[in-house]
Amino acid sequence: MGLLEELNEEQIKAVKHLGGPALILAGAGSGKTRVITYRIVYLVEQKGISPDRILAVTFTNKAADEMKERLYDLVSTNLKSLWIGTFHSMCARILREYRETTPFSRNFVIYDEQDQGNLIKRIMNNLDMREKEFPPYYIKRTISNLKNRLIDEHEFEPMGSKQIRIKEVYIEYQRKLLDSDAMDFDDLLFNTYRLLNSNEGVRRELDRHFKHKLVDEYQDTNHAQYMILKKLSMKNRDLFVVGDDDQSIYGFRGADISNILDFEEDFPDCKIYRLERNYRSTQRILRAASSVVKHNKERKGKTLWTLENEGGKLTLFNGYDENSEARNMVKFLKEELLNHKRSDIMIAYRTNAQSRAIEDELLKEGIEYNIVGGLRFYQRKEIKDLLSYIQFISNKRDSVSLSRILNTPRRGIGRTRRDRIESYAEEKRITLWEAIKEIAREDTIISDFVDLISSLENIERVDELLEAIIDKTGYIRLLDEEDTVEADSRIENILELLSVVKTFTLKEEKYSPVEYLAEVGLKTDIDEWKRDDSVSLMTLHNTKGLEFPVVFIAGLSEEVLPHYRSIKDGTIEEERRLFYVGLTRSKEKVYLSYYRKRGIGWGSSRMLIPSRFLFELSSEDVDGLDWISKEEREEVLSGESVRDEWVEHPIWGKGKVLKIIDGDKLLISFDGMIKKIKREFFT
DNA sequence: GCGACGAGTATTTTT
DNA sequence: TACTCGTCGC
Ligand SMILES: Nc1ncnc2c1ncn2[C@@H]1O[C@H](COP(=O)(O)OP(=O)(O)OP(=O)(O)O)[C@@H](O)[C@H]1O
């Protein structure tokens, strides 16, 4: 078996590790994912471990699929029974399997973020809370953070009157989820933990069952995930985790970097392996990446070396605004296309909104591209509307889906009828659907809706059900009447959904709506991404684990990367790691760019300065870094910040004061440039 | 009682 | 831009 020939000494040691917990702490591109994959092969083929006793956790479903594919190539044993997937999909599977020990059914629904938001708004409305005073996204985040820390609605100790109201929402939110036979993403983890914590029999069974547990991207696990792993590893302590503290970028979602930093203390009998050889990038790229990330304090240092050649310098360029940045970017990109395929190139940015300018330019130049993220297919209004019908018909307790379709398309059920249904249900302690059926007796508009739903019940095949929904609600017909470009594209999406559903029934030979819903519930953007011959566009977060010969990182301006919010929240180190992750995706060549003027809309008057991260690179490694003026450099690195002071200059016009330097000089941002001028000049 | 329309405001990353 | 909130006409 030539398996071990494709690994270096350090990797082989890790792959062959036996007996107790292990942490593989290693930098970017050192083959961590490869070690996990080959270790599974080793366990199955050499150690005779049955695949179904191995649990492998990846960060995305996509990563799981790729690993599976790789494994099928490497192993002749049937691996169908291997547990491989994300924490969330593993938890969903456990919770469905052990449903008798939970208050949920086998077919519980998974609420996505939109559903969560809608439910929270509905509850706030019932509790007479103003969205001005309590922004729903803030409540959602609070609840999510609590759940990731395994604090339930009763344990939550509110501080201050605002939090008391948030606690009310949290309690009601959980009650409604239970009534709806639904869980949000965080509940998948929390409920699994609860199951393991409260039911020793189940815990022991799973612990005993999973002889080997392997976790990729361990640096981005949160407390709930950590506790689940702990519960599963009390007897079978073969917990094998790999990660890189410098690549922890999901703190906002509760990922806790101390999970990896403190692994040694948590598992004192663990063995630590380090992989130091990088197989991906040139020396230049590694040096640049390392010179950036070494500015972080919260990290375990690592060495990383490569036998690759030195490689070309990184290239820095800019543009006045996002559009001109994109224009310049595409110029470089076209040069790269002379000796690269489109699929060798990736463009990464901090926020989804940044893709717009770049897309426009690529479209203009006729360069095919593929975009990951943004508005996902399954989140588009028309798709969610129709899926909500299927969801509700499959589960009449699902109040969120019901509430969504109640007046979609418009059928005259507005604020008043809605409130009446809500309070009627509340009063009688019955579900929304039961309330609707009772009210239908004296309200023809409502009884029409009940009739509509009845006519859709008892359709067994999901493809037929979808067709019937479209037909009976007139969804496409109404869009057709609108006769706008927008409506036409919605119709296209619906036809696409129809064909996706058809394919599903043919390929999977599964026909029931519930099976289809379980399939799409945990789908994400990156999962759908395919390496066809297009340039790839995605957020830096989505680049995790990928590699490309040529990488562009756009928008390296202060307040973009690092993002304004992160500067305010003091999470600069995570932003720096994000930049580090982006840099280390590249095999050969990196382009960096920034822009000076914010786009249209809010804050468009704001001028931006180059990102502080650029100055953590050496101009020996980066072409174009020297071009940034001395003034701009000073502006980023020093001086006293000023807010909202403007000056008028006879030549440069109106300018915003950014900083005061040495007490007597002002650093001013005029349209398109930054100047340092004596304070006296303006008095 | 419903919904169209205009005014005003917020502002990231995702399983 | 995109979404919420308040007003007004049907
Ligand atoms: N021993 C090896 N010989 C040749 N190539 C290797 C070896 N180990 C890893 N590689 C290659 O190096 C690249 C990076 O490997 P992998 O994705 O496993 O690293 P990683 O540590 O998970 O990276 P990251 O943390 O940056 O996502 C891949 O292209 C992989 O095929």
Image (cartoon, coloured by chain):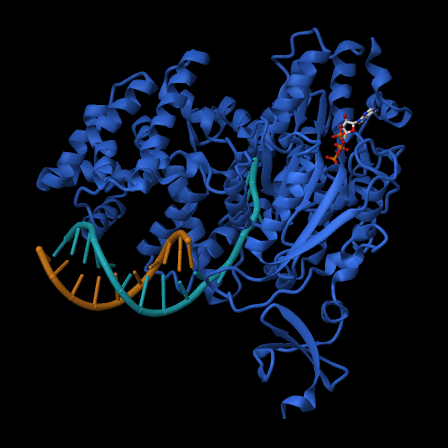
Chain colours: A blue, B cyan, C orange
Q: Point out residue A97 in the picture as x, y percentages from the top left corner.
A: 51, 22
> Farthest bottom residue?
A683
Quarter of the picture for ligand 1? Answer: top right
The residue under the point 26% across, 40% down is A432
The residue under the point 90% across, 32% down is A307
A331 or A491: nearer the viewer: A331
A527 or A347: nearer the viewer: A347
A532 or A224: nearer the viewer: A532
Q: Point out residue A75 in the picture as x, y percentages from the top left corner.
A: 72, 10
- Locate residue A221: give its quadrant: top right
A259 relative position to A438: left or right: right
Please tell me whether residue A74 is drawn above or below residue A25 in the rendered image: above
Which quadrant is the N terminus of chain A positioned in?
top right
Which quadrant is the C terminus of chain A positioned in?
bottom right
Please tell me whether residue A161 is drawn above or below residue A560 in the rendered image: below
The residue under the point 15% across, 39% down is A446
A463 relative position to A668: left or right: left
Please tell me whether residue A619 is drawn above or below residue A467 in the rendered image: below
A370 relative position to A422: left or right: right
- Locate residue A276: give its quadrant: top right
In this orientation, does residue A259 appear? no
A521 or A332: nearer the viewer: A332
In this orientation, does residue A288 appear? yes
- Locate residue A322: give its quadrant: bottom right
The residue under the point 52% across, 34% down is A524
